[in-house]
Image (spheres, rainbow, N blue to C red):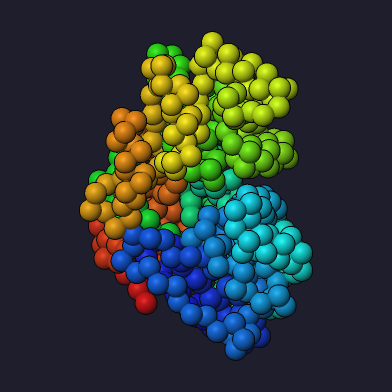
């Protein structure tokens, strides 16, 4: 290939950096933090002053893809979805209440120039390269794969994706594969030279296919018998938040969240209207008021007391935290038969795991939490289908995985296996 592709930290979960270069231009896709619990948790040094980067594209707002954004010099354009921008700003603003450095970061991000919003199927021309984003199903709302065109060569970078979320299968149709077939390969008329695909679940062997729709159904059934629930979940996992909110609404329950998550959900709601989908409307989400005894003003106390009466009468889902500050909420509802659901990756609460979180483990153990979670990443069969549909003519590269040799077990033809390259 005439186009040069370099992948940094591709053989770990998170922190991957992809560099695509021509003689004139150089693009970077994602610049995030390495996740704790991986074999390699170091963040590679990147020489921004001498690399002559023409632009940085972000696939989505998860920290392992965007977490080092502030290191990018001001004169380098960055490209991201509008929802990604708003979510990141909300996170910075929330953290800035207790962290002066985050306050400075929020101010920097709010005032940063050279931030451009990408849109699905709308080309971005960077010198002699054309980058076209396409929406993908992922646990982050605003996620993209990128088709890069240079020198009559095409490189497809998938970012994080899957086909088992609410945007994965619609009316029996596999949306990610349909998008690739219709818009990217154009039913085989456009040849893709290189495929760069995530392989997260290849590292996590033994996963059985469990979809967001499965989880919504199971949550619906669970809430019929259990009306008081604490839910431990990531604030940026929009699909699973929506699954639990919809299941709660079907059972006449509301979801109660803190101010930060309420602001985050407002972003999802507005985007939901724009994208013409009802799944992310979150009509039954309400901010959890402080305990009435904590309210100094009488109007605030009355408001909190009325909320608590509704919660006890109709049931509730409260987004939980393992932090000591959440203990007062646990104590406040100690007289009720509250159940706890843990909806995050199991590795965080598995003793001996590299990503083990003692505080989170103690919280789940103390509240007798049950697991109800689906992966934000493509299962093995989905990865196989994407490889087969793209059928790159020259190379396949895996990123976002520690399973360097697992491709040999993929159910794809030998011709495609022979195209796998590892750096």
- The answer to whether residue 325 is above or below residue 293 is below
Q: Position of residue 69 (x, y in %)?
A: 60, 67
Q: Position of residue 416 (x, y in %)?
A: 35, 64
Give coordinates of residue 397: x percent, y percent. Answer: 41, 68
Residue located at (59% from left, 85% from top): 51
Residue furthest left as drawn:
352
Q: Residue, x 72% and y 62% (percent of image)? A: 107
Q: Is residue 78 above or below residue 85?
A: below
**In front here: 20 or 342?**
342
Apparent side of residue 389 relative to residue 256 in the rendered image (left or right): left
Residue 338 in percent (x, y) is at 40, 21
Q: Quadrant of the C terminus?
A: bottom left
Q: For residue 219, which quarter of the picture?
A: top left
Quarter-wise, where is residue 281 in the image? top right
Judging depth in this view, the residue of 413 and 348 nearest the camera is 348
Residue at 44% in and 73% down: 43
């Amino acid at each position: 290939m005439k186009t040069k592709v370099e992948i940094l930290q591709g053989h770990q979960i998170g922190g991957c950096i992809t560099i695509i270069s021509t003689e004139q231009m150089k693009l970077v896709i994602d610049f995030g933090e390495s996740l704790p619990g991986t074999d390699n948790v170091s963040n590679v040094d990147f020489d921004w002053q001498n690399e002559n980067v023409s632009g940085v594209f972000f696939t989505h707002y998860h920290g392992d893809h965007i977490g080092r954004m502030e290191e990018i010099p001001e004169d380098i354009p960055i490209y991201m979805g509008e929802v990604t921008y708003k979510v990141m700003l909300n996170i910075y603003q929330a953290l800035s209440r207790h962290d002066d450095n985050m306050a400075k970061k929020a101010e920097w991000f709010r005032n940063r120039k050279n931030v451009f919003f990408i849109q699905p199927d709308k080309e971005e021309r960077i010198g002699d390269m054309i980058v076209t984003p396409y929406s993908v199903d992922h646990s982050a709302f605003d996620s993209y794969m990128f088709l890069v065109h240079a020198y009559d060569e095409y490189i497809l970078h998938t970012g994080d994706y899957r086909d088992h979320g609410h945007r994965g299968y619609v009316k029996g149709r596999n949306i990610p594969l349909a998008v690739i077939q219709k818009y990217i390969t154009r039913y085989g008329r456009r040849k893709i030279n290189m495929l760069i695909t995530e392989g997260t679940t290849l590292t996590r062997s033994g996963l059985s296919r469990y979809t967001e729709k499965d989880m919504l159904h199971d949550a619906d059934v669970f809430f019929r018998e259990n009306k008081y629930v604490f839910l431990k979940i990531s604030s940026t996992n929009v699909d699973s938040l929506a699954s639990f909110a919809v299941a709660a609404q079907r059972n006449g329950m509301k979801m109660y969240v803190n101010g930060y998550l309420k602001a985050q959900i407002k972003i999802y709601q507005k985007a939901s209207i724009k994208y013409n989908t009802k799944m992310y409307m979150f009509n039954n989400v309400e901010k959890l008021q402080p305990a009435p005894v904590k309210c100094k003003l009488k109007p605030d106390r009355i408001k909190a007391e009325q909320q608590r009466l509704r919660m006890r009468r109709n049931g509730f889902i409260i987004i939980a935290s393992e932090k000591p500050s959440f203990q007062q909420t646990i104590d406040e509802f100690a007289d009720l038969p509250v159940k706890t659901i843990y909806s995050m990756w199991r590795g965080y609460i598995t003793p001996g795991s590299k990503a083990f979180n003692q505080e989170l483990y103690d919280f789940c153990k103390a509240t007798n939490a049950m697991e109800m979670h689906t992966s934000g990443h493509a299962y093995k069969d989905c990865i196989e289908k994407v490889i087969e549909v793209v059928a790159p003519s020259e190379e396949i590269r895996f990123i976002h995985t520690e399973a360097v040799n697992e491709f040999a077990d993929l159910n794809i033809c030998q011709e495609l296996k022979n195209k796998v390259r590892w750096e």
